[in-house]
Amino acid sequence: MKNTHEQVPATGSGPVAADAHARTRERVARAVLENGPSTAAALAELIGLTPAAVRRHLDTLVAEGILEPQEERVYGQRGRGRPAKVFVLTPEGRDAFEHSYDDLAVGALRFLADTGGDDLVLEFARRRIADLEERYRPALEAAAPERRAAVLAEVLSTDGYAASVQAAPVGGGEQLCQHHCPVAHVAEQFPQLCEAETEAFARLLDTHVQRIATIANGEDVCTTHVPGVRRSPAQHDLMHDTNPRRGSHR
């Protein structure tokens, strides 16, 4: 049965209560890491707490610089009322969770590189991305060509990549932007991970794409250029309206 209350009351004190609250905050932050941008209500449902309890932990995590609130991105026609507030991991929050995993992953990939060379690492990266590509393909194949980049951003976001699409500032086409990368620290040492992902994007979008920035290389966002597809003025305006961060990427 779903637990709708915290195990330790908010008024508790002492080291036991403090430890319990710290563990709960870690669960909240980990839920954001695993599910991407999330509302307080969605987190409450995932973790089994009341929305009020989750909001208290969210306030603390925001104050500690682990999470930050953002306006929820809406694809398509926006309804009435203010957009929902979602919470995302800050770079510092992402670092806190991923370093232990990164150490293991880097060690394993270094072993592959030492024993089989860089080509073996690339083969591993391609196999890793194959599952994602297989899951995304039906949605991409069902979309019109001019909608494929936006659909790819949507399905990436469901996996926690916090992706969006914007008009390319020069040269036409679009930019696919991923605001979160779960393997960024590993990819700093093994760019084959980014290479395999870019190859998969090209196959899914059925066009040549170019990776022009990566979080692993010190940028704020992973950015992939997608050549333009002729679109009507109404479609062009809709794309601009549904991407409020347009123009913020390099």
Image (cartoon, rainbow, N blue to C red):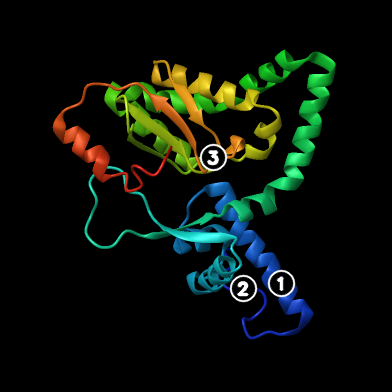
Q: Which residue is mark 2?
A: 6
Mark 3 or 1, nearer chain start: 1
Q: Is residue 125 left or right of residue 234?
A: right
Circle nearer the viewer, 2 or 1:
1
Mark 2 or 3, nearer chain start: 2
Q: Which residue is mark 1?
A: 20
Q: Which residue is mark 3?
A: 219
Q: Compared with residue 91, is residue 15 higher up or lower down, i.e. above or below?
A: below
Circle nearer the viewer, 3 or 1:
3
The crowd level at tag 3 (other Cα within 10 Å; few <14, some 14-19, many 20+) is some
Residue at image position (54%, 28%) is 132
Residue 137 appears at what percent x and percent y? 44, 23
Q: Is residue 91 visible?
A: yes
Report the front residue among 168 and 88. 168
Report the front residue among 2 and 165. 165
Mark 2 or 1, nearer chain start: 2
| Alpha carbon distance from label 3 to label 1 | 36 Å
2 and 3 marks in contact (CB < 8 Å): no
Residue at image position (48%, 28%) is 212
